[in-house]
């Protein structure tokens, strides 16, 4: 099979930190762009977390497939290197604290003057305009601010965070979307653009169901745990299986009929208490008890298999052990286990932006801090090894 | 200000259902594409949920700014209309149950034969390849399958869903990203593509922190509620305020020092028990009690304001009331309150893909079911009003 590289020929300077920016850079690299990750001379904070030469899993996941150079943007010569590189690249992306690049003489207007075709893309907690533009934001505080915490968890427990960094990944996916939109536009106009992605903006649409309920009732109802936020659908819950849990919902009447058959309880199909959606909602406790009585006698895999054969909407609550060995993610090539250059079994993640019948580029092991500084500075700026060594001695890179 | 319309000139047939596909179509429309939403003659299920002529908030949020036509793809003449439209459009997007369009003679190979420049984009629960390719998936079951539920909630409560439809929105954002990548590629090659986005693939990277902890420990630790998944950072929690809650984390040592000053407790800065990150993690209960003692005497807005002035990472846990009136979302124009055509105050949502110093297109009120069928079929296929009426009589549209 051929390899899908829609962004072949595009060069990116990636100043990403932690998840949001680095995920965007990862998507660009996997789409065929040449992505040069720029770190401070001490390296991005995530690189060092594991305390070993082999960087932490999150760092490897988001930064493999990038070239790694260092530049000290607080040093005049380090800053100058970036200014010299900018005319030769297509994209600069960053998710520093608001204003960091501008405070160091590398703001969007300076860089776009050097290169009018440049796409300058910023990902921040709250965006580059408005009263909160200078505020710090990270995934957990965005979960708070966006309203997500207020609708997660039980009525009698405090507002709860989702245990996954959705805000960061939503921000990174939209940052990529903005960059590629601007690349497409540049084909028509010859001009670059400044992209301004706010995590807060990106999370809002995920509250669609809860906002629908809120506007319908005129107020925010109590949290409903794993039940439907409007308490309008049943079955809709997480049920105990013999060896864990399964999530199941009956979205349409036919899903309930199929479930009754799957449970070996065809008589329930004509039971008045459960006939219509509103009946099942009114008798939610009974419905949940019936489903639970069935699920508790089966393993989560058995239930999943039966449910999918019957055309129901159901899935096992997978643990992380299950996820890293998930047959679907492995079959699609989204995940792959390989031995890495440190001699360890390593889980490689590939882009979710998939072209049918095309492979995605492979993911090499992550480069060491500054490993590509010499070759990149030679290729783009004509610096020789002695000049690069001097810059290193001065802590400019 | 000028209006950002990077995709001006692009035409889309949007077969989206509920959130995933429709969000993608919304992003395309707000980027300047002409998006024609195709519904069955009875309308998309989400349109009717509110039971009134004014569709539900989620339907309005994702489908305003689109033209609305109907086509019965199970009727030969309805199917033929789609086949006749395809040579004149750039993108077909859909998130039906796997195989629905192909089963009705509208699969990607048929459509791309009619139009080799066509980008055919599918969003599904598990993707178009692999053993689960035919399985039904919705947001809640993807939260189960992806591992997100297994890391959300408390150690002594069941696995918990996030109360926001992150999987759908992540899927829709990646679907948009794939389409625009293919549009960019088409500028170079002249060829379209088939995009295959799996929600399961898209959620995996959001587990970065939890997977990092899992690989470091060699097993999955118990759920930690609102605390850090590796129990390695404190403060990192949701704290009670006088009028609600705030989320706060101290990511670096300086954040802790700033918090001590903000709390009026400078002596804590030199307290050995809290000196290093590992010390604060070891004494997490005491740290949380100290923070809580302070937050409980202030409103969440006061705490947010103090925290942002001091350079801490903190946010109020906003309710839905707070969110729909959020000063930042309103100032950025992400949200706007306007009177709609039904005479009601209506919250309008605008795209998170923002170009700096450019307006995004305005969002008109959502069109009635089939409102644009006549004008679209006249413009693209030359049908007159009588021919459209005949098609309607036959239930082909």
Image (cartoon, coloured by chain):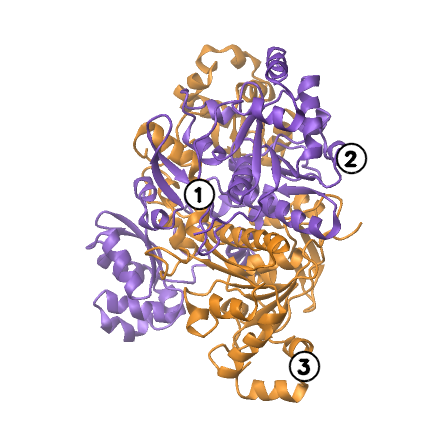
Chain colours: A purple, B orange
Instruction: Answer with left or right where residue A167 lies relative to residue A131.
Output: left
Q: On what subunit does the disc labeled 1 rest? A: A
- Labels 2 & 3 near each other (Cβ < 8 A): no
Q: Measured from the top left, where is residue A309 in percent x and y?
A: 28, 64
Q: Secondary structure at mark 2?
A: helix
Q: Secondary structure at mark 1?
A: loop
- Labels 2 & 1 near each other (Cβ < 8 A): no
- Same chain, labels 2 and 3: no
Residue B316 visible in this rendered orientation of the protein: no
Q: In this rendering, is residue B245 above or below A359?
A: above
Instruction: Answer with left or right where residue A279 lies relative to residue B179.
Output: left
Residue B89 visible in this rendered orientation of the protein: yes
Q: Which residue is mark 2?
A: A113
Q: How many residues crowd mark 1 within 10 Å: few (<14), some (14–19), many (20+)?
A: many
Residue nearer the viewer, A264 or B29: B29
Q: Distance of mark 1 from mark 3, alpha carbons?
A: 45 Å
Q: On what subunit does the disc labeled 2 rest? A: A
Q: In this rendering, is residue B182 above or below A47?
A: below
- Same chain, labels 2 and 1: yes
**Residue drawn at 52 percent across, 75 percent down:** B40
Q: Secondary structure at mark 3?
A: loop
User: How many labels, in total?
Assistant: 3
Q: Which residue is mark 3?
A: B382
**Residue drawn at 28 percent across, 73 percent down:** A269
Give the mark, 2 or 1, whose residue is nearer the N terminus: 2
Q: Residue furthest right?
A: B1
Q: Which residue is mark 1?
A: A350
Q: Residue furthest left?
A: A297
Q: Distance of mark 2 from mark 1, alpha carbons?
A: 35 Å
The circle on residue A232 is none
Q: How many residues crowd mark 2 within 10 Å: few (<14), some (14–19), many (20+)?
A: few
Q: Measured from the top left, where is residue A49 in percent x and y?
A: 45, 23
């Amino acid at each position: 099979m051929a390899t899908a590289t829609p962004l072949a020929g595009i060069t990116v300077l990636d100043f990403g930190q932690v998840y949001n920016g680095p995920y965007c850079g990862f998507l660009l690299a996997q789409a065929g762009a040449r992505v040069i990750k720029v770190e401070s001379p001490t390296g991005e904070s995530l690189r060092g977390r594991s305390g070993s030469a082999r960087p932490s899993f999150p760092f490897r996941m988001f930064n493999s497939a990038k070239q790694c150079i260092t530049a000290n943007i607080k040093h005049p010569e380090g800053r100058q290197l970036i200014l010299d590189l900018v005319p030769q690249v297509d994209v600069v992306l960053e998710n520093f604290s608001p204003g960091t690049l501008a405070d160091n003489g590398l703001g969007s207007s300076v860089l776009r003057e050097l290169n009018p075709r440049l796409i300058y893309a910023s990902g921040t907690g709250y965006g580059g305009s408005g009263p909160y533009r200078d505020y710090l934001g990270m995934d957990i505080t965005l979960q708070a601010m966006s309203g997500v915490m207020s609708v997660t968890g039980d009525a009698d427990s405090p507002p709860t965070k989702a245990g996954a960094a959705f805000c960061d990944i939503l921000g990174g996916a939209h940052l990529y979307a903005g960059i590629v939109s601007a690349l497409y536009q540049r084909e028509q106009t010859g001009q670059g653009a400044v992209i301004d992605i706010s995590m807060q903006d990106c999370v809002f649409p995920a509250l669609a169901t809860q906002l629908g309920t809120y506007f319908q009732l005129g107020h925010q109802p109590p949290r409903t745990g794993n039940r439907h936020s409007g308490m309008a659908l049943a079955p809709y819950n997480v049920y105990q299986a013999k060896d864990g849990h399964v999530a199941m919902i009956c979205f349409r009447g036919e899903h309930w009929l199929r479930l009754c058959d799957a449970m070996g309880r065809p008589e329930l199909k004509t039971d008045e208490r459960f006939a219509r959606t509103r009946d099942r909602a009114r008798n939610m406790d009974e419905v949940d008890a019936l489903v639970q009585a069935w699920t508790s006698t089966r393993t989560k895999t058995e239930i999943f298999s039966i449910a999918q054969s019957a055309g129901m909407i159901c899935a096992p609550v997978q643990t992380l052990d299950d996820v890293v060995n998930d047959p679907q993610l492995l079959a699609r090539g989204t995940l792959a286990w390989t031995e890495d250059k440190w001699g360890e079994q390593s889980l490689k993640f590939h882009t979710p932006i998939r072209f049918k019948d095309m492979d995605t580029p492979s993911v090499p092991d992550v480069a060491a801090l500054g490993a590509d500084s010499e070759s990149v500075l030679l290729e783009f700026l004509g610096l020789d090894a002695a000049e690069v060594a001097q810059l290193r001695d001065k802590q400019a890179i």
